[in-house]
Image (cartoon, rainbow, N blue to C red):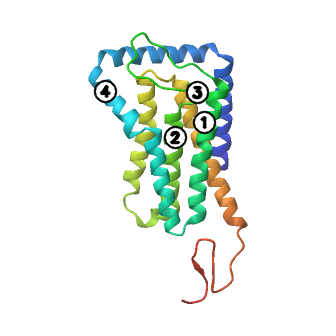
């Protein structure tokens, strides 16, 4: 996980530099892909509407944040309070990091004479892509950490998460509100946040002193002894 965090962080930094300096091959690729998909979106209004519903409702950042909030509440009520704090803090920090980078980079979104959708704020990184990656990554981590061994729906949930992360990136480019590199930046930065959260959580658990027999740990579970 440490290598994953470092690699995704480095790749995010490299992509950020290329976007800021306006590296010609990257900009050419972005424009070529976006223009091709925009022509298809204009020509296929039915498919465009499906993409708008998926992007603006099903995979909207507020939908993802609602899922993260529900997870935090369930963990807290289940006395998994350290884990609940980690999920909440990671989600909030990701939003702050995302908005901060948008402001600092100030990248313009694609501009069209015949737009099929609209979006606010700057383009890089994609908030939809980053929020989906952070939320789905955290949810899969929580499931793997607590319930994977006793839950048969793991494969289905993983598939839904992967489709959601990839799908929302597709919709943002197809609808002409993001460049492909915006989406890639959102994915990379989002995964870096998730990997860092996992690493710091593991570190925090190692730092917690062992409780004596008959005492309770920080999440309310009895350690040792008999009930």
Question: How packed is label 2: few (under 14 Cα within 10 Å), some, or many (20 or more)?
Answer: many
Mark 3 or mark 2, earlier in chain: 3
Query: Which label sits on residue 182?
Result: none
Query: Quick check: can you spot residue 124?
Result: yes
Q: Residues within 10 Å of mark 3 (few under 14, many from 20)?
A: many
Mark 3 or mark 4, which is nearer the start of the sequence?
4
Disc 3 target residue:
124
Task: Give the residue furthest to the bottom.
Answer: 226
The tag earlier along the polypeptide, 4 or 1, is 4
Separation (CA) of disc 2 from disc 4: 22 Å
Residue 79, x across and y down, in percent: 54, 69
Question: Which residue extends farthest left?
Answer: 46
Residue at 65 percent of width and 44 percent of height: 5
Q: Is residue 154 above or below residue 115?
A: below
**Left or right: where does residue 153 sit relative to residue 28?**
left
Residue 131 is tagged as 2
Q: Residues within 10 Å of mark 1 (few under 14, many from 20)?
A: many
Q: CA distance from mark 3 to mark 1?
A: 8 Å
């Amino acid at each position: 996980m440490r290598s994953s965090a470092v690699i995704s962080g480095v790749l995010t930094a490299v992509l950020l530099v290329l976007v800021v300096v306006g590296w010609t091959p990257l900009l050419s690729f972005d424009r070529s892909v976006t223009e091709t998909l925009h022509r298809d979106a204009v020509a296929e209004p039915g498919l465009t509407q499906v993409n708008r519903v998926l992007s603006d409702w099903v995979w909207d950042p507020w939908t993802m944040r609602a899922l993260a909030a529900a997870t935090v509440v369930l963990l807290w009520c289940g006395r998994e309070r350290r884990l609940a704090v980690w999920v909440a803090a990671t989600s909030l920090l990701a939003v702050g990091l995302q908005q901060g980078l948008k402001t600092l980079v100030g990248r313009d979104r694609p501009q069209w004479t015949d737009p099929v959708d609209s979006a606010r704020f700057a383009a890089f990184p994609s908030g939809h892509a980053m929020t989906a990656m952070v939320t789905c990554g955290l949810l899969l981590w929580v499931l793997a950490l607590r319930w994977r061994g006793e839950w048969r729906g793991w494969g289905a949930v993983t598939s839904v998460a992967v489709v959601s992360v990839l799908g929302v990136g597709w919709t943002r480019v197809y609808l002409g509100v993001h460049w492909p590199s915006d989406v890639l930046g959102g994915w990379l930065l989002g995964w870096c946040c998730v990997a860092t959260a996992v690493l710091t959580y593991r570190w925090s658990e190692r730092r917690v002193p062992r409780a004596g027999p008959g005492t309770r740990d920080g999440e309310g579970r009895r350690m040792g002894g008999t009930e």
